[in-house]
Image: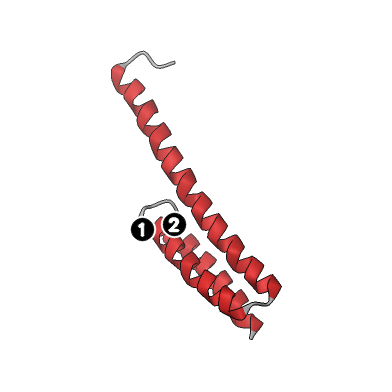
Amino acid sequence: MANIKSAKKRILVTETKAARNKAIRSKVKTACKKVEAAVVAGDKALAQASLNAAISEIEKAATKGVYHSNTASRKVSRLSKAVSAMA
């Protein structure tokens, strides 16, 4: 356990940031799962709507620094590819 005041503060700040990042990552994963479920079900309209929502969540996460920009781009690309392949 930390004894120095600044070290104690860093622990609290780190916990807060970790909780925020975890919540954002969870939102992204949920959005991606919705797209994948729509693709498996074969519902093109739902897949497209879910894709737009997922892209929005992924871009927000990248903007906030939760995901690296390349990681965000890769996720968007893979989801888009899956929805496009439904045609």
Q: Could you tell me which secondary element the residue under label 1 belongs to? A: helix
Report the residue at 47% width, 62% height from top.
72
Residue 58 image point, x, y percent: 46, 61
Report the residue at 44% width, 57% height from top.
68
Quarter of the image with the C terminus in it: bottom right
Residue 27 image point, x, y percent: 50, 54
Report the residue at 61% width, 80% height from top.
44
Per the image, the residue denoted by label 1 is: 63
Classify 13 as above or below 73. above
15 sits to left or right of 78 = left
Q: Tell me if mark 1 has few (under 14), some (14-19) or many (20+) residues whose alpha carbon lies within 10 angstroms of its own.
A: few
Of residues 1 and 43, the one nearer the viewer is 43
The Cα atoms of the two marked residues, 1 and 2, are separated by 9 Å
68 sits to left or right of 77 = left
Per the image, the residue denoted by label 2 is: 68
Residue 56 image point, x, y percent: 43, 65
Amino acid type indicated by mark 2: His
Viewer-side label of 1, 2:
1
40 sits to left or right of 75 = right
The residue at the far left in this view is 6
Quarter of the image with the N terminus in it: top left
Q: Considering only order in the chain, which callout, 2 or 1, is on the residue closer to the N terminus?
A: 1
